[in-house]
Image (cartoon, rainbow, N blue to C red):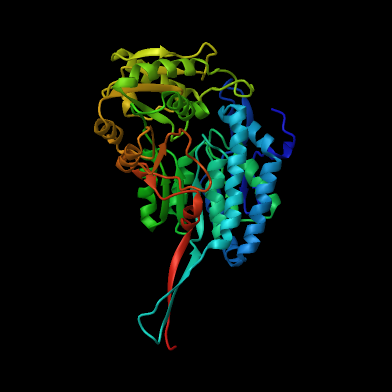
Amino acid sequence: MQLTDPTLLRSQALVNGEWVDADSGKTFEVLNPATGEAIGTVADVGANETRRAIAAAEAAFPAWRDSTAKQRSDILRRWHELLMENREDLAQLMTYEMGKPINEARGEAVFGASFVEWYSEEARRAYGEIIPTHDPSKRLMTLKQPIGVVAAITPWNFPLAMITRKVAPALAAGCTAVVKPPEDAPLTALAAAELAGRAGVPAGALNLLPTSEPAPVGDELTANPVVRKLSFTGSTATGKHLMAKAAGTVKNVSMELGGNAPFLVFDDADVDAAVEGAVASKYRNNGQTCICANRIYVQDAIYEEFAKKFAAAVADLRVGPAIDEATAVGPLVNEKAIEKVDDLVTDALAKGAGALTGGKRHALGRTYYEVTVLTDVTPDMRISSEEIFGPVAPLYRFETEEDGIALANHTPYGLASYFFAGDNARIWRVSEGLEYGMVGVNTGLISGVTVPFGGIKESGIGREGSHEGLAEYLETKFVCVGGI
């Protein structure tokens, strides 16, 4: 890995504006998922460093809170510019530490930077309101004020965008932040924090705590009363655990949790467009996104046509090293991930599913898996209820519109959903009938900085992105002025 700016490859934690080693002196290796080789080592911090980071964020909060919206906006704007100037290095870091194909990594570098740009502008729009009074002697208003110190715990699959989608609105609102980046991919986050410091984010306003043992850091972030908000992206099981811990001090929480996204193709859909949308949704980031199509339901009349065309399109996807420009699907993040995917496919095949393409580990070895399309998948197979997080697409049949909606909703999750249809009336009915926080209609790609991202049911609480993302870091204060 050759960075244009080697100083972006940080190996320490960031606490109160200083790059520091772990108190214990411990470090852990960051591995290239394709080869298992170490590409760097980082400080392995614990509860003591976390407490100091929280104290630093608390000390920095009053001055940052009291800065003007324009001052915060200008600093965030500069951070965005630096992220864009260094986007190729950020893409390289992502690709080497978590296996994202290089062209997708370049896209994420721009996408991640766009959140900083957006919230540099939204910083100026934290409006309160004047309320018509019920008493002529009183005046009523609301103020929007920053919550305080924010803790953020981010995942490995989008190592830049998940940092900026949380930190940028927090800083824009006037909050300070303590972030635990993912143990599988901390290097991108540390580089982003380095650039934030160069942009003028003051000491203590942003702290980064890499660790190979999340529990002690997470326990401190959830138990410490100074932390007033927790923002987490990850599994539903971990989210529930963190929510229970945060309840002890009644923290405000934002949770973007697991998904089991349905992708429905109705018999009046443009089949070629549906195939294109399904490929884009399912195989992006090697199938490792929380909004990937997890269950593809196709109406009986077009099932065979769709399956044939979909399998042909999938067979053209090139599996290879993530750094290769021609690669469409790279390695999974680690050996645990490849074992889960392999177990899900093995279970489905043993219970009667067929493989139109793929169905086993790739000849490249280690963490590579063949791009796979399974047919005749049934609800009793594990793959129907578990998040796959790999390049495997299970196909199901359904008969009527009502059946399709019912099958799509038959899950405790409610993050993202997709469907392809032609009839306008059906588009309205299905959009309203799907129990999901996000619905993609005739498209497999739905994310954007201007739109609210988040789920319902066991897929989460709160929204990220859009103007709603800023509101997650603001408290509403009612002020009643008497004696007028």
In the displayed structure, 327 sits above or below 429; it is above
The image quarter containing residue 483 is bottom left
Compared with residue 244, is residue 238 higher up or lower down, i.e. above or below? above
Question: Looking at the image, which residue sits at the far top?
Answer: 363
Left/right placement of residue 51 relative to residue 385 reads right
Please state which of residues 250 and 386 is positioned toward the viewer in this rendering: 386
Front residue of this view, candidates 256 and 127? 127
In this image, 364 relative to 395: left or right?
Answer: right
Residue 370, image x, y percentages: 48, 16
Residue lying at 55% horizontally and 17% vertically, measured from the top left: 318
Please state which of residues 462 and 420 is positioned toward the viewer in this rendering.
420
Relative placement, left or right, of 81 versus 47 is right
Does any portion of residue 201 appear in the rendered image? no
Give residue 450's position: percent from left, percent from top: 52, 48
Residue at 56%, 38% in the rendered image:
159
Up-down relation of residue 26 to residue 299 (above or below): below
Residue 214, horizontal then vertical, whole percent:
48, 40
Quarter occupied by residue 430: top left
Report the front residue among 268 and 401: 268
Count of marks placed on residues:
0
